[in-house]
Image (cartoon, rainbow, N blue to C red):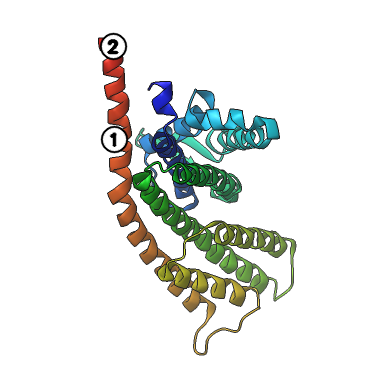
Amino acid sequence: MPENQLNQPSVVVTTLLHYNVEVRDTLEYCLNKPAYDVGLFKNKKRSVIVEVDQNTPLKNILNNSKQDEAGAKLEKLIRDFYAEVYDGNILTLGVDPDGKEEVRVDHSQTLVIYKYVLPIHQNVSAMINGILNDAHSKNIDVAEVEKVYRAEEKMFSAVAYLTLVGDLNRLFAEYNKARQEAQGAITPVSNFIQQDLEQVIRYINTVRAGNRVTALVFKTMEDKINALVETMTGRRDLPEGKNHNDLMRETAETINLYVRDCEAEFRVVYPPLVQKLVAQAGNNANNGEAA
């Protein structure tokens, strides 16, 4: 794509949105699923690193930000993300008993995925927000990409809460089991689980602090998550007639419903935007060949 078109606000935002979607979709591996799509895994693995290896809008922004070290720090974070998660031992390719290629996930290390996905997504979102604000100040029409950006922001928060609360519930159950097996005593095992629990809660707080979604249905979901965390940490009494399992189930159901609605909205607006970018790139390439 020609340099002048590559730098158009809508084009830049679309490419950054696409990158954030690939980063966000890495959270899929924090879910304990029977199987993961091998093709999608390979696409994500390539997309995570290619944007900082080639001349892309993201790479250009990072290069221009290196004077204040912000760009260098984010690029290092992305490269560490690729090396530790996609090219390390957390996500690997293997062969199943039928001889078919499969994605293998070390679920004992999935908290590392949050360590990278949350700040990378947050930083790229800040870039997008800055570009949109600049476009508004110059009266440039970015309504279409801004609509997709808002939908992606909701989708990211929903998926992040889905996976994090799933880990929260799992770890809380493991912690209680460890304490029960030790007749209530604190042990090295329960301490280890508690540290992971506290880290997950910090990640939940990071998602809450970083999003700008104000819809009442979203805030209702966040309130339920906050209430769940507070009952688990002893800062709130359980509702009369309910136990922790009831709250965990109800909160998970609320999140699942919200994810379903967000995904439906996102699937309507995102693919057409990407298809338009791909078509534009194809037209430019054909025109270049004709010239």
Residue 286, horizontal then vertical, whole percent: 26, 17
Distance between the alpha carbons at the discs numbered 1 and 2 = 20 Å
Q: Is residue 15 above or below residue 111?
A: above
Q: Going by the image, does 57 lie left or right of 100?
A: right
The amino acid on which the numbered mark 2 sits, given as a three-letter code, is Glu
Determine which of the numbered discs, if any, sits on residue 276 in the image: 1
Q: Residues within 10 Å of mark 1 (few under 14, many from 20)?
A: few
Q: Going by the image, does 115 lie left or right of 31?
A: right
Q: Which residue is mark 2?
A: 289
Residue 31 seen in the current view: yes
The amino acid on which the numbered mark 1 sits, given as a three-letter code, is Lys
**Picture quarter containing residue 42?**
top left
- Residue found 32% across the figure and 25% down from its top: 281
Residue 96 seen in the current view: no
Q: Is residue 114 above or below residue 290?
A: below
Q: Nearer the viewer, residue 30 or 104?
A: 30
Residue 26, horizontal then vertical, whole percent: 47, 44
Q: Nearer the viewer, residue 79 or 99?
A: 79
Residue at the farthest top position:
291
**Picture quarter containing residue 258?**
bottom left
Q: Considering the image in quadrants, where does the C terminus appear?
A: top left
Chain-order first, disc 1 or disc 2: 1
The residue tagged with tag 2: helix, strand or loop?
A: helix
Q: Residues within 10 Å of mark 2 (few under 14, many from 20)?
A: few
The residue tagged with tag 1: helix, strand or loop?
A: helix
- Residue found 48% across the figure and 30% down from its top: 57
